[in-house]
Structure formats: C-alpha cells, structure tokens
Image (cartoon, rainbow, N blue to C red):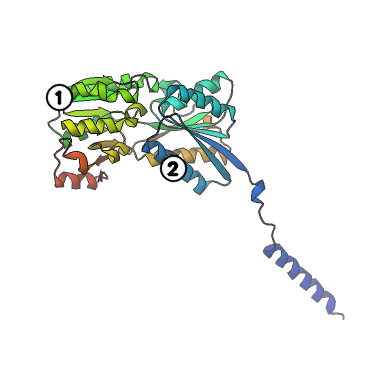
Amino acid sequence: MNTRIPLIIITSIIGIIFIFYFFKPIKNTTTEQSYRIAIFEPATHPAMDEIAQGFTDTIQKNGLFHYTFKRYNANGNKTLLRAQAEDIIHNNYDLIMTIGSDPTYTIYELTTKKHLTPPVVFTAVSDPVNLGIIASQTSSGNHLTGIEENNNFEDQLNQLLVLKPDTKNMLLVYDPVIKTGIHEVWAQEVTQLATQKNITIQYAKVFHTNEIQAKVQPFMQNIDTILIFTDHTTVAGIDSLITLCNRYGVTLYASDLNSGDKGAAISYGMMQYDFGAQAGKLALEILDHHKKPKDIPIAETTLKRTKINTATAHKQALNISISQLNNIKALGGIVQ
C-alpha cells in the first residue's frame, strides 16, 4: 500500500490552514467606509469645546468605521451662523451635529425649506417640541434626533439660598432673542419662583456681547446676585460680568459649569462633555447601525452639579464655610 498519498493530502491540508490563518488579506483602509460629520456651534466658549470633544471622542472610540469632523463656529454672529448653515447643507455631510437651539433651528429651517433630509443630531437644546423642530419626545417625525437640555430653576434657586441665604435682589442677564425667544419664558418662570422666595428680580436684556458692561453696570449698586442662562451671548461675554461682580462684590451665578472655571463664584449645570458623549452615541446609531433619526427617541439630561470657585467667591461676596464646601463635594459637586 502506498502511504505517500495520504501524507501528501495531510500536508496539503495543513498548508491550506496555515495560509488561511497567517496570510489573510490585510484590510485595505483606503477603501474603508468613511463618514463626514459637521459640528455646528454658535460661539466660542469652553462649554462648546467640551461638547464637541465628548462627541468626537465617543464616535472615534466606539465607531466601526472612519470619521472626519469639520467644526463650524459662528462666533456669536447671527449673520455668520446663517451663512455657515448654508455652507454645511451645500457640502452634503453624512451627519450634522448641532450645539444649542439657534444652530439646530437654522439647520432645521433650511433643510425643510430645501426639502433635504440629512441626519441631524442636536444637543443642549431646551424644549425642542415647543421650538417646533420635532413632533414629540418619542419620535421627531423627521430627520432630527438629539439631547434635550432640561432646566430646573426651582432647584437652582434653592441651591443659591443654601449658599447665600441673604439673597434679596437679583439681576437676570440674558439675550431675549436667542433660542427663538425661549429666554423670555424662562425669565418669567424664574421671576415667579424668585417672588415666592422673597427675591426681587430685575432684567438686563443684551443682544450682543459688547453691550453687557454698559447695560449691567447701572444695576450693580442695587443687587446682590446676577443670574445668567446658557445662551451664548452672555456666556461669551462672561469675562465682563466677572470683572463687574469682582469690582462691586456681587455674586455671579452661572447656569453652566464652564463659567465657574472662568470666575463665576457659583455655577450649576451639566458636565458639558456628557452632552457631547450622548450625542455621539446617537450619531453612531444612525451611521453605523443605519437607524433613522425619527426612530430614535429624544434623550434627556438630568444630572446637574454645583461648582464653587473659591478664588473669586470672596470677591463676589459669597461667604461659604469649609463645612458647606465639604457638603457640596459629598453631594457630587465641585470645589476649585
């Protein structure tokens, strides 16, 4: 019997297995699926940078393909914002991520007008249903989905009174036009809540960042606290408010944590990186798993923290004890 034939067969099989496992074709990255993503932000601010970073980090870490990002920043200029929205739509990106209500509404308005449906993931948008960009929380009914920013002014004012119980006269500084006028609704809500807590509210309405000092300074002798929302007109001009509050001994209370890093004695809000990370997960559902935006429910953010800037607290007449600072940290707050 010739034993060489089985040996040849066995050797051939081993050779085929060796070639299959050790000489598999190398993945050609030049032909890998690639997606182009636009990030559209209204102004320059650390909060915007953190949101964008959380978004890109999440996609690059968890995505299955290759992604390129192009950031558009309107620098607080409404005319530029409109022009950039047109450019984004013209460049036919695979997905558009918008930060805040104004970029989101502008993209929604233009794409609807042009009968275009590029997938849009928004983040840090308050009340998107009343803004008119989605049909409901469970389904947008269109090419948008995203992360809703929820306000809790009751809790925010309660936090203030724990830290500064003698608060009596508050100035609310905000842009009444931005976010399609929702700040006027917020202002009335804050006023109603503050009145119940025996706090008098006054208003400084600013339409441009360079107006802040001129419009706010006349109030400084008669107030003890300034409250600002998360609109990019005021947060982009936070340096002017910090300077005034340090000079006159007025506590600056911001609704975003990044303004606390810059010098607001108290800040209250979400970790902005988390906004971006959540938006990144929704983007991957669309790009990698081929879900339609209308089939992805709107997500909400609820976890908010209090931050104390100890370097400016004394300048802004915030007298806070060591035990209070320790309590803030114990509750998940931030002391710096």
Q: Which residue is mark 2?
A: 53
Q: Residue furthest left?
A: 166
Q: Earlier in the sequence, mark 1 or mark 2?
A: 2
Image location (x, y in percent) of residue 186:
30, 23
On residue 76, which mark appears?
A: none
| For residue 153, side relative to residue 10 (left or right) | left
Residue sitting at x 21%, y 40%: 312
| For residue 224, side relative to residue 336 (left or right) | left
For mark 1, does the 10 Å Cα neighbourhood hold few (<14), some (14 to 19), or many (20 or more) residues? few
Residue 9 placement: quadrant: bottom right
Q: Residue furthest right?
A: 1
Q: Are marks 1 and 2 in contact (CB under 8 Å)?
A: no
Residue 19 placement: quadrant: bottom right
Q: Which residue is mark 1?
A: 221
In three-dimensional space, the C-alpha distance between marks 1 and 2, rounded to whole angstroms, equals 40 Å
- Residue 215 higher or lower than 151, as above or below: above
Between 74 and 277, the one nearer to me in the picture: 74
> Does residue 141 appear in this view?
no
Tag 1 secondary structure: helix
Point out the image quarter for the N terminus.
Answer: bottom right
Tag 2 secondary structure: helix
> Does residue 25 appear in this view?
yes
Residue sitting at x 30%, y 28%: 229
Between 278 and 177, the one nearer to me in the picture: 177
- Residue 66 higher or lower than 295, as above or below: below
| For residue 224, side relative to residue 56 (left or right) | left
Between 167 and 86, the one nearer to me in the picture: 86
Image location (x, y in percent) of residue 163:
17, 37
* Discs 1/2, front: 1
Residue 314 placement: quadrant: top left
